Amino acid sequence: MGFYLGRGIYDVAEVARLIRRSRRRVEGWARAGEEQALLLSGELDGLFSFWDLLSFRVISELVERGVPRGEIARGAEYLAVELGTRRPFAHEALATAGRGFFADIGSWVDVGLGGQQAFQVVVEPLLEPITFNDSGIAAIWRPRKSVWVNPEVQAGAPCVDGTRIPTSTLADLQNTGLGIEELSDDYQLSTEQVQAAITYEASLAA
């Protein structure tokens, strides 16, 4: 069991919910086919880690921008060697190292910029809400103000920033009829923190 500690633990459904993509799409990215390259196998047996979750965010964006699946797989292999990590899409240097690779595969994204700049325009916003450790690997993701996803806290479930209180708990309790001020008093949080948690959960369900 110690192997799983501090890694975050997510099933396919939770990954899909947190990156706002369908379960079918996430399952497809994690499965190889005769003509489809495997994009991410996952670090845990049948489950995914915090770094897998963040990697799926990058994969999702690249797919949405029209990067061919085979090129994403090849890019991951290239960057793993270039950055010396099995988690290249969760590495702080992704934007700078990745632009050199993806610029070679053509005009896969039209944002009015050329190759290398275009890659950074797409990827840098994905990296901005992430805090990295001394090794350059993602340590904490803050998908929204007052919300953090920390693999060392509550198995990586989204929580009120700096606490162990899951955002889903607050949203579920509000759905039972408890008000924001009541939740604020019960959990010793500000009303702004409670509202941020509830708003975040609502955005995932939208």
Image: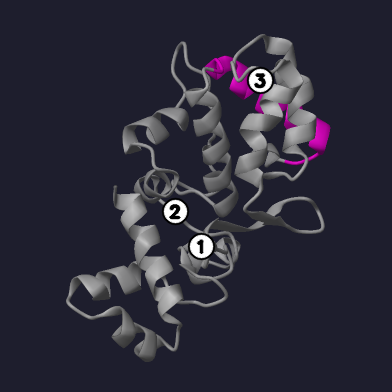
Identify which amino acid the numbered label 2 is placed on. Answer: Tyr
Asked if the residue under mark 3 is in contact with the one under mark 2, i.e. CB atoms within 8 Å, the reply is no
Question: At numbered mark 2, what does the secondary structure look like: helix, strand or loop?
Answer: loop
The three-letter code of the residue at mark 1 reads Gly
Res 81 seen here: no
Q: Residue at x 72, y 16 (%)?
A: 115
- Mark 1 near mark 2, Cβ–Cβ under 8 Å? yes
Specify the segment rendered in magenta.
67-85
Q: Is residue 12 above or below residue 65?
A: below
Q: Type of residue at label 3? A: Arg
* Sequence-earlier tag: 3 or 1: 3
Indicate which disc residue 32 carries.
none
Relative to 131, residue 153 above or below? below
Label 2 CA crowd tier, 10 Å (few <14, some 14–19, many 20+) = many
Q: Where is residue 114 shown, x and y percent of the image?
A: 72, 15
Considering every residue shown, the one lying at the far front of the view is 112
Q: Residue extending furthest left?
A: 177
For marks 1 and 2 on the same chain, the one whose residue lies earlier in the sequence: 2
Q: 95 or 7, which is in the foreground?
A: 95
Q: Which mark is residue 156?
A: 1
What residue does disc 3 label? Answer: 74
Q: Measuring 54% from the left and 52% from the top, which residue is drawn there? A: 49
Instruction: Give the image quarter of residue 139.
Output: bottom right
Label 3, label 1: how far apart the Cα atoms are: 28 Å
Q: Residue at x 52, y 49 (%)?
A: 44
- Identify which residue, 74 or 189, lies in the foreground: 189
Q: CA distance from mark 1 to mark 2?
A: 8 Å
75 or 158: nearer the viewer = 158
Q: Which mark is residue 10?
A: 2
Residue 178 is situated, as x and y percent measured from the top left of the image, at: 22, 80
